[in-house]
Amino acid sequence: MMDEEVLVQLRNIVGKNRVLTRGNELYTYSFDATPIVQAQPDVVVMPGDTREVAEILKLAHVNQIPVIPRGSGTNLAGGTVPVEGGIVLNMTRFNKILEIDEKNLTATVGPGVITAEFHKAVEECGFFYPPDPGSMRISTIGGNVAQCAGGMRGLKYGVTKDYVMGLEYVLPTGQILRCGGKNYKDVAGYDLTRLLVGSEGTLAVITEITLKLLPRPETKRTLVVFCHQMVDAARIVERTIAEKIIPATMEFLDQATMQVVDDFSHLGLPRNVAAMLLLEQDGSEEQVVRDVDRIAEIAREEGVADVQLAKTAEEGAKLMAARRSALAALSRLRPTTILEDATVPRSQLAQMVEAIIQISAKHQVQICTFGHAGDGNLHPTCMTDERNHEEIKRVEEAFREIFATALALGGTITGEHGVGMAKMAYLPQRVGEGGIELMQAIKQAFDPHGIMNPGKVVAKAARSRVVVRNA
Ligand SMILES: Cc1cc2nc3c(=O)[nH]c(=O)nc-3n(C[C@H](O)[C@H](O)[C@H](O)COP(=O)(O)OP(=O)(O)OC[C@H]3O[C@@H](n4cnc5c(N)ncnc54)[C@H](O)[C@@H]3O)c2cc1C
């Protein structure tokens, strides 16, 4: 329960309509896109500018109240679940594109700008912002930055951290600071910009973001390859890159995912192949044609079942949309869908997919895998039912083995979704006890009272996926 005096002060800062305390309102903010984790905040506050954020944080710091920054709540790591109650800081009013600087190739935005709307705005000016998480139609740029979101164009263009040039942020004490800016070169001191990108709301609240833009590629083409075996798909990826062709997108779907996607999207995908590779190249017309032709040749040399070139941009867009629909299609199968993102070096892709198939059979849980073949980022997705506690135990065990296998293959526990609370238990295995201690010391320096998004990333007590209801 929030102290009535604190509520009065919050209403004084943002206005009474921007402070939500009703049961149904709090319930809405008790979960995000992560299954099986839920906890209710004490209050939801919707600030409209940096000064208001600073005032709220000062109040929270003095009273030692947890603060959970939130964009659209699409994260898959329980990152916005208020496990210790407190204030959910809804940042969606920071939804202005403040500047598109054509001379410096930068854009400055509020964290609440919707990712796809940002894409559209910069593309209308002839520019290109590559990070494209599958959730981009609803996710915010602030959430993308705080999670260091990836997407389908990661192989060629990198991820969100490669585009964040500068930030305005507010410390839990209420101090407003800036780091980075429009300089392409800047090595003045520690790189706090990079530290804040991917900090998952545990260090500070980001209130303004300056992003790097690229010129919009002239054209793009899409190629689909159907493979008899997953290992063929992996070899095509390896050979393509070894020939120094870096496609913008190299996605794969395993057989089970293909079938479900086809039932959902009615694309007429073949049912008897082991995997589908979806490739897209962008750039100049000449380079795109050359690269796509060569990839098709490599695929045929590998004896694949079929190679199809999208005839029109619309056909290419339809295929990419089908890939984007994979999660939606899978989530129709059972009441609870757990989407994970174990990542391995690209050369271990086939081995990892094979291991997931075996682990899924061993624990008798349904896991379909799709993901970013070009950068080794797999999304093993489990269709389950959270009400079946016995099955959930088997699911937990299967994922424990999947992450252990990824680590043994030189991979990592998350390639883009972050740690939040869902992966905390695995973090020490990835970064070591020394790494955890250093991260905790950094956290302490930013947030001495531990009010910023407590219970996440480097919190003292790691939880695995549990239902937490404090309503
Ligand atoms: C269907 C689907 C597909 C997805 N596909 C991808 C994908 O391809 N790649 C990928 O990387 N992720 C993907 N995700 C995960 C998720 O969408 C991304 O992580 C996204 O970046 C989250 O944005 P959001 O606005 O919803 O942030 P939220 O979920 O609201 O917040 C995410 C984290 O950022 C923090 N945060 C938010 N705003 C701020 C701020 N202003 N200051 C400080 N901290 C802040 C929060 O505290 C939280 O820890 C997908 C999710 C779904 C549901």
Image: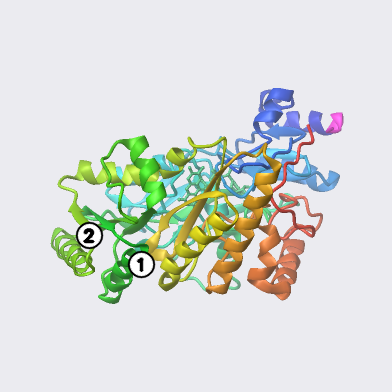
> Where's residue 137, x and y in %?
43, 39
Disc assigned to residue 231: 1
Q: How many residues crowd mark 1 within 10 Å: few (<14), some (14–19), many (20+)?
A: some
Q: How many residues crowd mark 2 within 10 Å: few (<14), some (14–19), many (20+)?
A: some
410 with respect to 184 (left or right):
right
Residue for badge 2 = 283
Q: Does the residue labelled 2 lie within 8 Å of ligand 1?
A: no
> Where's residue 306, x and y in %?
21, 56
Residue 29 part of the magenta-drawn span: no
Task: Identify the amino acid type marked 1.
Answer: Val
Mark 1, secondary structure of its residue: helix
Tell me if residue 405 comes above or below residue 251 in the rendering.
below
* Residue 199 appears in the rendering: no
Q: Nearer the viewer, residue 189 or 124?
A: 124
- Label pair 1/2, CB-CB below 8 angstroms: no
* Residue 197 appears in the rendering: yes
> Where's residue 278, x and y in %?
30, 54
Image quadrant where residue 52 sits: top right
Q: Which of 300 and 43 is in front in this view?
A: 300
- N-terminal-most mark, 1 or 2: 1
Region of the chain picked out in magenta, as a range = 1-5
294 with respect to 121 (left or right):
left
Task: Identify the amino acid type marked 2.
Answer: Gly
Q: Quadrant of the N terminus?
A: top right
> What is the CA distance from the residue labelled 1 to the residue labelled 2?
28 Å
Mark 2, secondary structure of its residue: strand
Image quadrant where residue 34 sits: top right
Q: Which of 244 and 398 is in front in this view?
A: 398
> Where's residue 315, x and y in %?
21, 43
Q: Main secondary structure of the magenta part?
A: loop
Q: Which of 382 and 284 is in front in this view?
A: 382
